[in-house]
Image (tube, rainbow, N blue to C red):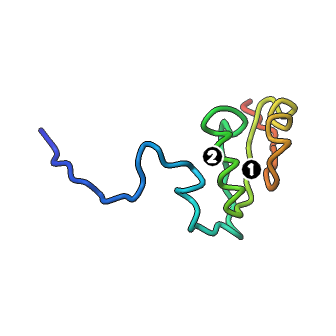
Amino acid sequence: MTSPQARIGSPFNAHSTAEEVIAAVDLSGQTAIVTGGYSGLGLEAARVLALAGARVIVPSRAPDRAAAALRSIGGVEVATLDLT
């Protein structure tokens, strides 16, 4: 079974930055929980969400490592993640 695909008319492309995508978005008063938010794409997501005004919480099994990675980003909190 096939599904028809259609363009959605986004003004963004492969060269768009995270800042460009979220530039017109105000997340003040919102809370975002970003799993994996201290490395790779999660770190970038946490940074840009905080830049847009969100309170960002990054759960981590290694809070010291997460805090070190997120130190330069304001508005981000690290919460200990207990998987037991």
Residue 25, image x, y percentages: 58, 67
Q: Amino acid at mark 1?
A: Ile
**Residue at the spot of label 2:** 45
Verify CB contact (< 8 Å) between mark 2 and mark 1: no
58 relative position to 35: left or right: right
Residue extending furthest toward the front: 15
Q: Give the structural element (helix, strand or loop) at label 2.
A: helix
Question: How far is the residue under mark 2 from the one under mark 1?
Answer: 11 Å
Identify the residue shown where x is 72% and y is 32%: 83
**Residue at the spot of label 1:** 57
Residue 48, image x, y percentages: 65, 52
Quadrant of the rendered structure where residue 9 is?
Answer: bottom left
Q: Give the structural element (helix, strand or loop) at label 1.
A: strand
66 relative position to 46: left or right: right
Quadrant where the N terminus sits is top left
Quadrant of the rendered structure where residue 61 is?
Answer: top right
Q: In the figure, 72 relative to 21: above or below?
A: above
Other-residue count near label 1 (Cα within 10 Å), few / some / many at <14 / 14–19 / ≥20: some
Identify the residue shown where x is 63% and y is 39%: 42
Please name whichever residue, 11 or 2, is drawn nearer the observer in this view of the structure.
11
Please name whichever residue, 73 or 64, is drawn nearer the observer in this view of the structure.
73
Quadrant where the C terminus sits is top right
Q: Nearer the viewer, mark 2 or mark 1?
A: 2
Residue 70, image x, y percentages: 80, 41
Label drawn at residue 27? none
Q: Amino acid at mark 2?
A: Ala
